[in-house]
Image (cartoon, rainbow, N blue to C red):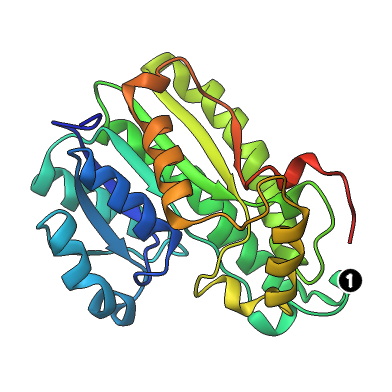
Amino acid sequence: MMMQGKTGLIMGMANKFSIAYGIAESLKVNGAKMIFTAQTDYFKSKITDIAKDFGGYEVIPCDVSKDDEIEKAFDEMLNITGPLDFIVHSIAFSDRNELAGKYYNTSRSNFLNAMNISCYSFTEVARHSQKLMPNGGSLVTLTYYGAEKVVPNYNVMAMAKAALETGVIYLADDLGEVGIRVNAISAGPIKTLAASGVGEFSKILEFERHRAPLKRNVTQKDIGDACLFILSDMASGITGEIIHVDCGSNKIGVKF
């Protein structure tokens, strides 16, 4: 019960196959209470029953592409739950039509939109987190190995994740003085709604399974348990880190 007595926010859960769902499961088993946000009414309708099973709170609308939505949602959450102990940011977006072929064919509009939703939104979350975490806390976002090495068809998302990882270390420095830790988990490829938009994703899964020292793909539970540790008091001295949870595949230096 590593999270007994702690309450947190999960942003970005789309369905039971989301990485955020696996994280929420590990947190619930260890005593955490959670509140959730949804980007649109469509996703709110999809996760309302799931979210109630995890925390019992109503899902809060929060379109992170709009300047005032995060602040508005956080104010509403503060009234519902009181101070929070942790926030999980599991949000990313690109036009799936541009997650195939050459990176140089990325459009300006999709580049800016991907950066806004996938990277800048975490900066906004971190900025507003201070009023939700007066006693300190922990922020975790999700990244991917494509920020470090070339992954076919990851394209503009690689740029967004690279910027996100840089943001993690700067935010860790900014927020350390108020007791808020900031980290990222770099999860190996896993079947989610978002991943299904990456061209030839099944080939990436197969390649990674053979390449990884553990000879398997990462699971929701692997990622959830790693996030549980990073959010817990057991990781109280860890901040500004990118933690790889990928069955060791990032240790094998092969470009494919």
Q: Position of residue 192 (x, y in %)?
A: 51, 70
* Kind of residue at badge 1: Tyr
The one of 233 and 107 positioned closer to us in this rendering: 233
Which residue is at 18% across, 49% downward? 77
The one of 74 and 151 positioned closer to us in this rendering: 151
On-image quarter of the C terminus: bottom right
Q: Position of residue 220 (x, y in %)?
A: 44, 56
Which residue is at 22% across, 38% downward? 30
- State which quadrant residue 110 falls in: bottom right
Q: Is residue 92 above or below residue 99?
A: above
- 107 sits left or right of 169 in the view: right
Which residue is at 86% across, 77% downward? 105
Q: Residue furthest toward the front?
A: 215
> For the residue carrying disc 1, how many other residues have a C-alpha within 10 Å: few (<14), some (14-19), or many (20+)?
few
Q: Position of residue 28 (x, y in %)?
A: 22, 47
Residue topped by disc 1: 104
- State which quadrant residue 191 falls in: bottom right
Q: Secondary structure at mark 1?
A: helix
- 36 sits left or right of 229 in the view: left
On-image quarter of the N terminus: top left
Q: Is residue 204 above or below residue 178?
A: below
Q: Is residue 167 above or below residue 21?
A: above
